[in-house]
Amino acid sequence: MTTESGAPAPEQSFLSHLVELRQRLVRAAVAIVVVFLALSPFMKEIFDVMSEPMMAALPAGSKLLATGVITPFMVPLKVTLFTAFLIALPYVLWQAWAFVAPGLYRHEKRLAAPLIMSSIAMFVTGMAYCYFIVFKLIFRFIANFAPVSVAVSPDIEAYFSFVMGMFLAFGLTFEVPIIVVLLSRFGIASVEKLRQARPYVIVGAFIVAAIFTPPDVVSQLLLAIPLVLLYELGIVLARFFGKPKSDEEAPAQEAS
């Protein structure tokens, strides 16, 4: 169905967008499944890699526990699926980009590609920081506090939930510079306002750390301090990649 001018009717255009969205979601899901199937023979090894920070902190001969009947199968499967999602994430985001790109302006398209790539890089960097540094310190700190009469053998389901939560917290924390640059780029907050908000960010960083990390000083500092430093990095980057001052002054001049 078309209008008198020959353009597609709104209903037809909406349906075509839904069809395209479904196709791209299916492609993204297929990519994740393909990567998962390729990794499935190595589920045990992938889980062993994820459990390495905890195993290194436990006494020699210690092992993680599986208290559920199907937990020894389900937890490695979840870890492998999560790994497959991370590997397929660039393709998944490319499908999302291909869906929204036709509706963007040229300058928005130039901004989107580096934004997607930098977001992935910073998220993975946050996870790497969490895995190689934070876990090593936290697990040793907690294991050393255990009394001699207590055998530290965490349940793998609880361990998996803890690791996923920490990965998410640190991955999102490392997105802070990009968020700050975007706030400046789109004129939501100038560099001066971002600097003025510094005290609130510092307080907020420790509140976020208290919510998303274990109740010990070490893990909270390991999240709060990078968050504050990354905010400062975002302010520095906003000076170079934020909204030009000429663009900020133009509306004021037109109003006068």
Image (spheres, helix red, strand yellow):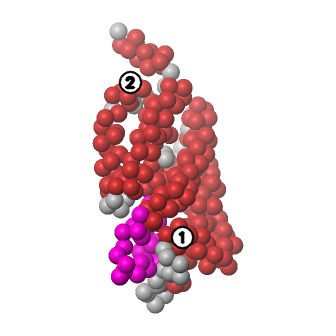
- Residue occupying the point 53% across, 82% down: 61
Query: Nearer the viewer's eye, disc 2 or disc 1?
Result: 1
In the rendered image, the vertical position of residue 223 relative to residue 38, given as above or below: above
- Does the magenta run of residues contain 152? yes
Q: Position of residue 82 (x, y in %)?
A: 55, 67
Hey, which quadrant is residue 23 in on the image? bottom right
Q: Mark 2 Cα within 10 Å, few/some/many (few <14, many 20+)?
A: few
Q: Earlier in the sequence, mark 2 or mark 1?
A: 1
Nearest the eye: 189 or 50: 50
- Determine which residue is flagged by label 2: 192
Residue 163 visible to the viewer: yes
Q: CA distance from mark 2 to mark 1?
A: 46 Å
> Which quadrant: the C terminus?
top left
As drawn, 67 above or below 128: below
Question: SS for tag 2?
Answer: helix
Residue under label 1, please give it.
56
Identity, as a three-letter code, of the amino acid under mark 1: Ala
SS of the residue under disc 1: helix
Residue 178 lies, in percent from the top left, at: 50, 40
Farthest residue to the front: give it. 148
Residue extending farthest to the bottom is: 69
Percent of width and height locating residue 88 = 63, 61
* Number of residues whose C-alpha sits closer than 10 Å to that of mark 1, classed few (under 14), some (14–19) or many (20 or more): few
Q: Is the stretch drawn in magenta largely helix, strand or loop?
A: helix
Residue type at the position of mark 2: Glu
Q: Point out the stretch of residues depicted in magenta.
A: 141-166
Q: Visible in this render: residue 127? A: no
